[in-house]
Image: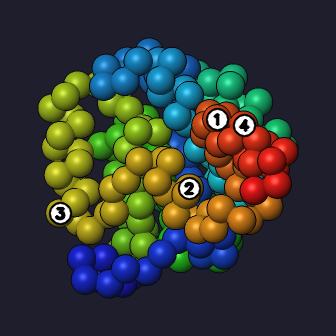
Amino acid sequence: MSDAKTTYSPLTSENAALVLVDHQVGLMTGVRDYSTGELKHNVVALAKAAKALMLPIVVTTTARDSMWGPTFPELVEALPGVAIIDRSSVNAFDDPTVAKAILDTGRNKLIFAGISLEVCAAFPAMTALSKGLDAYVAVDASGTFSETKRQVGLMRMQQAGVILSDYATLMVEILKDNARPEALEVYAAMDMGWAKLVGQVAQAYGK
């Protein structure tokens, strides 16, 4: 793992993968740091932007059939054909199937988001660090059940060396160049439709 405090090593389409952990209907009902609508928007936007940037995406649930229910439908719809791996372990990285799926991406920079922030996102992110990988958490595509849990979760991840950011900044960092053909799709995925409109106006006037 690079020393994130002293060395900036950017995320790219070639070195990054996205891991979405436990965005499940039952867990979503307990989230208190974001409204359900805002959290759903952010997670779906992250997933769509990552897909547009052709990142490998790993999606997992825990106790889907016995406790926490399925992945919320809007996220499933945003990722057609992406298998959702169910497991029983608290830490997603402790499950051999999930761990293999993550490591098989071949990417050394992993972006995590999960419910809850301090467990489902934090535990696998910190485990990734222990395996020599760089770990990022999209805080606004994660959620948790109280302000205390949010604050201590953020502090613990920072102490461990996890890089914290918001989902849009992470995706724009990967985009890197607004001249890329994926740019309009990425901005549209993040519900920045005005970017597409401005681009269309500029083209119409030959600018």
In the figure, residue 87 lies in which quadrant? top right
Q: Nearer the viewer, mark 4 or mark 2?
A: 4
Q: Secondary structure at mark 3?
A: helix
Disc 1 from disc 2: Cα separation: 17 Å
Mark 3 residue type: Gln
Spatial separation of the CA atoms under disc 3 and disc 1: 38 Å
Name the residue: 76% across, 41% down.
201
Query: Above or below — where is 80 with respect to 155?
Result: above
Neighbourhood count class around disc 2 (C-alpha, 10 Å): few under 14, some 14–19, many 20 upward:
many
Q: Earlier in the sequence, mark 3 or mark 1?
A: 3
**On the image, numbered disc 3 is attached to which residue?**
159
For residue 194, the mark is 1
In the rendered view of the protein, which quadrant contains the N terminus? bottom left
Of the pair 147 and 192, the residue shown nearer to us: 192
Q: Position of residue 116 (x, y in %)?
A: 38, 36
Per the image, label 2 sits on a secondary structure element best described as helix
Q: Which residue sits furthest front?
A: 205
Identify which residue is drawn at 72% across, 37% down.
197
Residue 162 in which image quadrant: bottom left
- Label disc, if present, on residue 197 of the rendered structure: 4
Classify mark 1: helix, strand or loop: helix
Q: Point out which mark residue 171 bears.
A: 2
Label 1 to label 4, Cα distance in Å? 5 Å
Q: Upstream in the sequence, badge 1 or badge 2?
A: 2
